[in-house]
Amino acid sequence: MAISRPLVNSIRSFATKTIPIRKFSPRKSSKMVAAASVSHPSELTVPNKTAHSFDKSTLDALLARRFFFAPSFEIYGGVAGLYDYGPTGSALQANILDAWRKHYIIEEDMLELDTTIMTLSDVLKTSGHVDKFADWMVKDVKNGEIYRADHLVEGVLEARLKGDKEARGVKEEEKKEEEDDKKKKKKKVVKAEAVKLDDNTVAEYEYLLAQIDNYTGPELGEIIRKHKITNPTTGNEVSEPVEFNLMFESNIGPTGHIKGYLRPETAQGHFVNFARLLEFNNGKVPFASAQIGKSFRNEIAPRQGLLRVREFTMAEIEHYVDPLDKRHARFNEVKDVVLTLLAKGVQSEGRTEIVKKTVGEAVAEGIVDNETLGYFLGRTQLFLTKIGIDPARLRCRQHMANEMAHYATDCWDFEIQSSYGWIECVGCADRSAYDLTVHSVRTKQPLRVQQRLEQPRTVEKLECTFDAKAFGMKFKKDATMIKETLLGLEKDKLQCIKDELEKGSSSVKCADGKSYEITADLVKINPITVTEHMREFIPNVIEPSFGIGRILYSVLEHTYWAREQDAARGVLSLPALVAPIKCLIVSISQDAQLRSKIHEVSREMRKRGIASRVDDSSATIGKKYARNDELGTPFGCTVDFATIQNGTMTLRERDSTSQLIGPIEDVISVVDQLVKGVLDWEGASQKLEAYSGVQDVDA
Amino acid sequence: MAISRPLVNSIRSFATKTIPIRKFSPRKSSKMVAAASVSHPSELTVPNKTAHSFDKSTLDALLARRFFFAPSFEIYGGVAGLYDYGPTGSALQANILDAWRKHYIIEEDMLELDTTIMTLSDVLKTSGHVDKFADWMVKDVKNGEIYRADHLVEGVLEARLKGDKEARGVKEEEKKEEEDDKKKKKKKVVKAEAVKLDDNTVAEYEYLLAQIDNYTGPELGEIIRKHKITNPTTGNEVSEPVEFNLMFESNIGPTGHIKGYLRPETAQGHFVNFARLLEFNNGKVPFASAQIGKSFRNEIAPRQGLLRVREFTMAEIEHYVDPLDKRHARFNEVKDVVLTLLAKGVQSEGRTEIVKKTVGEAVAEGIVDNETLGYFLGRTQLFLTKIGIDPARLRCRQHMANEMAHYATDCWDFEIQSSYGWIECVGCADRSAYDLTVHSVRTKQPLRVQQRLEQPRTVEKLECTFDAKAFGMKFKKDATMIKETLLGLEKDKLQCIKDELEKGSSSVKCADGKSYEITADLVKINPITVTEHMREFIPNVIEPSFGIGRILYSVLEHTYWAREQDAARGVLSLPALVAPIKCLIVSISQDAQLRSKIHEVSREMRKRGIASRVDDSSATIGKKYARNDELGTPFGCTVDFATIQNGTMTLRERDSTSQLIGPIEDVISVVDQLVKGVLDWEGASQKLEAYSGVQDVDA
């Protein structure tokens, strides 16, 4: 079966996407790319604090110098798509995860899980990953070199278009683009040669590029043959596209009979534990499970730094609700949160206009399907902006019908704009009863909620009576699934099927996405009257799924800027909540009395749980401040000779570099409140006196 | 090359060990097993609080009922050695890790890392894991069933000895043992048949069993042939033992050319990042890196629940020190901590007497090799007892020379006693310069510290001059390693080699454990006088390595007991520091006013960051308390009608069930201090009044 990228995405949208812009509207996207994406980093909105344009290469240098992250096994040459977090990156990640845990798990009393990464193949067979979680690749027929099929076609056609432009004399632009590419350090697959193309070919190439993500493998194969696309480095032909499953495979135990995969998401670990979770929650919905952990995907050729990696940390919530009641008890708390929405209606008309609406409006107007989904969109908007994402570069993009899995009710991605374009960082989907249904059918375990009715009720129902033998003969292994589906249908739908059966035959669409034809000799549908004491249902699942590495990288880009006086003096304006270190402690000189004082201050801060760091090196104060600007440390305390005389200490704010002064005790208490977020700098300025004694600039 | 278990262990001792008792002294261990291990759970020390003997099956039932953990993919039948943590287990684990992070990383300013699980095979080739991290297995020659070779021999010989006892009429004991086995749910490999053996055979079997862990694969093969050991379920012969590498293998990317393994430990991720870490620390030692994360080992046939799993969380510290100065700046802070020591000298004499010594004494007397190692032993003793390990069931066992890797200087395991015996849970090893040296040699990257000398110094040195060509010809790929080793030797050792060379030849022992013969024509060693400005050295690594799952399980066993009035009323006396929930909030009745009050109290607690839980179900107070005893919740607040009238609330302590009463505000403030550990129950009793109004027993 030919599996297109959108279908791959439908399994689990978060992890599988490249920059999703190209997917908005298959036929019309090329203009949209130009409109919605950012091709030159210099065009990015950058914090107002700086006069300098955003320069990714200086940010990259800072992140490497301060060991936020680095390629794994770098001394062994590294491997694409694997990165290690250093002390600063680890602390930033730990703080983001801690904030996430408090914002979601603690605040909402979710049930946390820690399930295994190594996953039995049967589980991922049921979820669809074994069959569908794949990309198409081609091989050089002579040297065996491998390309991702869509990337190869894209690279070659783009190069030909570039060559065409060059031949037509559009050289200025060409050069600029090349420079930009260099800046981005984006590995170009193909070098352009100046060859003029005829106008029809140009149009065709542009058309193909516009919908490159929508082709199936065989379609890509056709394009490759038709346009004589070969391996650009050798000129050799390439093979027909073949599917490459993106899961890392391994064997569990020594026999070789138990196949396992590294999970591509944490979600399945929630679903297989649903029965225990429900019992833990005294059999009641709604409730949510949550999990933070590593997931893996064996990318064919990862690029884009932290945004596309083979091993990554996810944080996922599975919120289980009654399908007939998707209200949320705390909806009121977020109904006034303003979202930037790019709805599916707009996209399907080929447009990209965003609208700003409150969560309350979006749900009331039916743009967002239900309260619970709206609730999580609001909560997530609050979370992302709290940890440092610029709300002006954050939007909610709704999936269009052809992007969504067939079973999904509604799906929104939080996309964050960075130098890589608009990148999906959080997916919020209403996945209906799909996941629990397929696992329940496969394992024959009832993953259902039973609800005692307050009053027994007499209801008119439609009863299905099966000719078990004939039914089994006709549908074999699918028989149970089809029966379950029929038995689970609502009355209206069952009535339609009954009407159709009376005319001859009808069809049942099952969780596997296929439709099965049934006839009146296999199943009879008759009205009956029953008295019910219990109601039984499979809960629907609303799933917010976070790619932590993507969010972390976006926070770094959004908070990075450079001091006006020097483009090389970078600052990370990380919120205190996530900053690796909250407070720097230094002394004005190497004087022994002052040195002992800073360790005293440090001990006091540690007692209060403030992550502080003493810098008692011989560097100048200015250099120490500059170093800590790069680490994103929001506050700095300096002791000087006035400290000895008057017991005072100064306090510096990173972004404004403005300073306050007060008794040591008071300054520490202010820092404590600033870090906890119960006081802002303005408030601090009212508690301590302004200070202008020491100049900040140096270095 | 035949690799014995001790050699496997020498690579990395923590993860590879079965119950290590059998390894103390190869020739004499069988008596020691009897003396030191605990064969019947009922003999275990249990908390004094209970009149009931420890019953593992009721604990297991509690842990399952309260979803601390459960087999992964249980609805798919599960896979041995893989477990998921539920909400309670996850919270307990998160709290233990949080305590660990504060105790080590924050308190000691360590550099945290988060490196990838997927590891390039080259890295693990260098560390020795690709070649040596293996167990021996045998296959049924007909049906292919697989056994771990030592387990098979052990199982069959033990069964024969049992059968012999039965035939000799020692039936009483037999039955009891069988019952105990049943209780432990330990899967027995072989069933005993009553066949009498002659006395020599009994002696031989006992001898073989005593040193079962010390045999190489070929030796096990000989034993299998000599004693006609077959597959006990089929009676078929089994194959010669073959090595099975315990790492999960996978391919990175689609080519199949880049081999990767799931890391068996986090340590290599530290070592390959050493150069960046050193730079981050301004080029100075000592400093430490730390990492918490998942590791994997593909056990042949895992048993023993959480103690031997295929995927587990580790927390590892690599502390880098100057090899000439292993003092520790904060040694004084732990020098009075008392350790329970089982030193190597005692063990090698076949004895098991423990001694109690302070860290200071142990280092001063040379029992523990150096201050830094002693410091970590002290800190770890404090950590383990703080999170709920019973100090009476905790000991430090030193590795004997034949257990340690050849490069290790000293190695101590923290062993914790549980119903599974004495289990290694933390390993503390001085690994010398081994790890950094092998990675440096392999990658040609200098993993060294350069230290500017305060005064240049003139020193008499011995200089090695190599005949490069001849040296290369003779040693080929090993030449660099041997040169590096010679160049790294201290003067005394080099003098010995010089003396030997003058007599003909000498040998150099390298990091790979082999000795290489050198002669005077290959290398000349001559005295020279040099003026040095810099000193350069490869730091030594002291490594405390924690198995978190083992510690977590041990905490559960050590804190579990049952109320006197009812053996089924289990309590987990978890310290507040790690308890999943700190405070239960309930009302005496379902009255609406009271219900709204408990939510008020809950909000107030949340504001203060106390992890509390409201139970507003219709269960009785007694039942609610019982439920929370099982969850290990240390405190409970109850509102009743006095709350409405007088604004008071009662506070219950889990272990004593004693109660206090006071104004709501005061009670919350006391709970806050109790949870933070700044107040104990006695202190609380002075701040609030005693209360005896509500009886606890119910359920």
Image: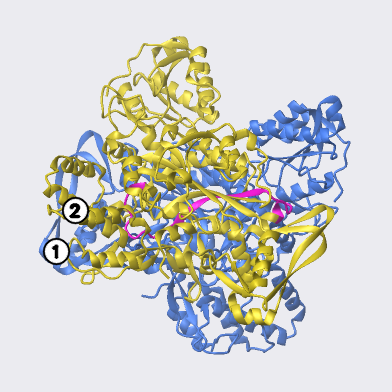
Chain colours: A blue, B yellow
Q: Residue at coordinates 25% horizontally, 49% vertically from top-left?
A: A446
Q: Residues within 10 Å of mark 2 (few under 14, many from 20)?
A: few
A407 left or right of A645? left
Q: Nearer the viewer, residue B248 or B452?
A: B452
Q: Quadrant of residue B79?
A: bottom left
* Mark 2: amino acid: Asp
Quick one: SS at disc 1? Answer: loop
> Which quarter shows the N terminus of chain A?
bottom left
Say if A683 sits above or below A69 in the image: above
Magenta residue check for B297: yes
- The reply to whether residue B502 is visible in this rendering is yes
Check if residue B263 falls in the magenta segment: no
In the image, taking residue A98 as reference, residue B83 lies left or right, namely left
A572 or B298: nearer the eye? B298
Q: Which residues are magenta?
A: B279-306
Labels 1, 2: one chain: no
Q: Amino acid at mark 1?
A: Leu
Q: Which residue is mark 2?
A: B199
Residue drawn 59% across and 47% down?
Answer: A384
Q: Percent x, y for residue A540?
A: 36, 49
Most foreground residue, B680 or A133: B680
The answer to whether A73 is drawn above or below residue B400 in the figure is: below
Q: Is residue B687 above or below residue A377?
A: above
Q: Which mark is residue A522?
A: 1
Secondary structure at badge 2 equals helix
Q: CA distance from mark 1 to mark 2?
A: 73 Å
Q: Are marks 1 and 2 in contact (CB under 8 Å)?
A: no
| Viewer-side label of 1, 2 | 2
Chain name for mark 1: A
Tell me residue B628's x, y (percent).
36, 29
